[in-house]
Amino acid sequence: MEKENKIIFYTKLLSSIENKRDVKIFDNENFEETKKEILKIKKNQNIEIWGATNSEKHKNKEILLVKDHINFSGYNPLIGKQKKIKTNFPDMTNVYEQQKNAIITISRGKYFLEEDIYNYPTQYFCYFAIIARSLGIKKVRGFLVNQKINNLKKHIVAKN
């Protein structure tokens, strides 16, 4: 049996909570480095992105599958000069691998924990999918790790 050829990205927030080896860190503060990493990926490789969320509907550390995102961050990582990206508005239809019981996340950017009205808020999760699609990656597997709100706040405050 052939080993699956996949690359795993963690959002910076999740990487500060869960220290894993053999993952690449998606740094929302350094998009150029992240874009360089994505450019190295062959279009037929499997890509996973992992992020953190807070949902009262699920247990702590429960893994949730993502089927779509809504970008409520007020920002698009493709804004600006794009030397290696051929399109500023990639088709975001079905970016994520469609899986049963998957959820839709709301990417909130720096406003991640300010309002408690969204079921599956994330910080910069959607940015990776936007960049990956613009670079020709067809499918992304999306996963969120549910975290207690105090754990998320602790890691966000420690970073700032």
Image (spheres, grey):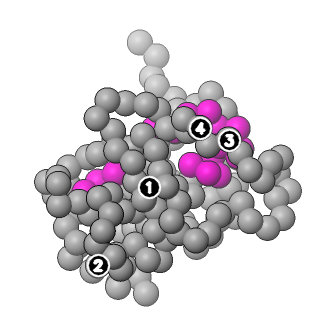
Residue named by callout 3: 91
Q: Which region of the structure is painted magenta? A: 129-146
Q: What amino acid type should be assigned to the residue bearing mark 2?
A: Lys
Q: What amino acid type should be assigned to the residue bearing mark 4?
A: Thr
| Circles 4 and 3: CB atoms closer than 8 Å | yes
**Neighbour class for label 3 at 10 Å: few (<14), some, many (≥20)?**
few
* Disc 4/disc 3 C-alpha distance (Å): 6 Å
* Disc 1/disc 3 C-alpha distance (Å): 23 Å
Looking at the image, residue 22 sits to the left or right of residue 20; the answer is right
- One can see residue 26 in this view: no
* Disc 4/disc 1 C-alpha distance (Å): 22 Å
Q: Helix, strand or loop at disc 1?
A: strand
| Circles 1 and 3: CB atoms closer than 8 Å | no
- Label 2 or label 1, whichever lies nearer to me, is 2
The mark that comes first in sequence, 2 or 1, is 1
Residue named by callout 1: 10
Above or below, 36 against 155 in this view is above
Q: Residue at x 58, y 71 (%)?
A: 74
Residue named by callout 2: 153
Give the numbered dot on residue 93: 4
- One can see residue 137 in this view: yes
Which one is nearer the viewer's eye here, 143 or 74?
74
- Label 4 or label 2, whichever lies nearer to me, is 4
Q: What amino acid type should be assigned to the residue bearing mark 1?
A: Tyr
The mark that comes first in sequence, 4 or 1, is 1
Q: Residue at x 22, y 72 (%)?
A: 149
